[in-house]
Image (spheres, grey):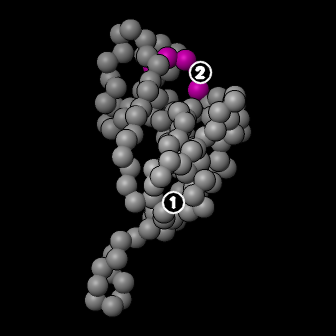
């Protein structure tokens, strides 16, 4: 995005969320004796995020059995927003994030569910 001085400056994460109309939820609180985020050097590690709203599971079940693909997409979105909220709470701003080194997605599925890419890629 142009900065008005003829140069180009990337838009920060916080500005991009505002442009997209995304309001992050409050940072999640742990369900047990662990922390949601820990920093080692310049790396921030987040614990596994669940599709939780107000400290209650939004979805319970397996994809292909109790949950359909659309529910799976929403569960992933909910967990992703929690991850961003946890990072923001730890760092103070998401603008401090310069790179994502690893992103892991885990799904509970029934034995005959094979549509994983529809959950992760949104198609």
- Above or below 66: residue 47: below
Residue at the location (57% across, 58% down)? 91
Whether residue 53 appears in this view of the structure is no
122 or 107: nearer the viewer: 107
- x, y percentage for residue 95? 48, 64
Q: Which mark is residue 113?
A: none
Q: Which region is colored magenta? A: 59-63
Whether residue 102 appears in this view of the structure is yes
- Above or below 32: residue 83: below
Instruction: Say if the magenta span includes residue 17.
Output: no
Residue under label 2 = 60
Q: Is residue 20 left or right of residue 91?
A: left
- Label 2 vs label 1: CA separation? 29 Å
- x, y percentage for residue 121? 33, 38
- x, y percentage for residue 111? 38, 8
Residue under label 1 = 94
- Above or below 51: residue 101: below
Residue at the location (40% across, 34% down)? 104
Q: Quadrant of the N terminus?
A: bottom left
- Above or below 46: residue 95: below
Q: Quadrant of residue 105?
A: top left
Q: Residues within 10 Å of mark 2 (few under 14, many from 20)?
A: few
User: Judging from the image, what secondary structure is the residue with disc 1 in?
Assistant: helix
Residue at the location (39% across, 40% down)? 103
Q: Is residue 14 left or right of residue 111?
A: right
User: Judging from the image, what secondary structure is the residue with disc 2 in?
Assistant: loop
17 or 40: nearer the viewer: 40
């Amino acid at each position: 995005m142009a900065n008005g001085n003829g140069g180009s400056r990337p838009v920060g994460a916080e500005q991009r969320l505002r442009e997209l109309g995304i309001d992050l939820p409050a940072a999640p609180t742990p369900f047990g004796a662990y922390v949601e985020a820990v920093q080692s050097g310049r790396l921030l590690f987040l614990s596994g995020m669940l599709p939780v709203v107000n400290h209650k599971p939004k979805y319970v079940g397996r994809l292909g059995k109790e949950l359909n693909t659309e529910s799976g997409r929403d569960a992933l979105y909910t967990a992703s927003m929690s991850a961003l909220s946890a990072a923001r709470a730890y760092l103070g701003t998401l603008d401090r994030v310069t790179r994502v080194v690893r992103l892991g997605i885990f799904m509970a599925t029934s034995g005959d569910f094979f549509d994983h890419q529809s959950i992760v890629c949104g198609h």
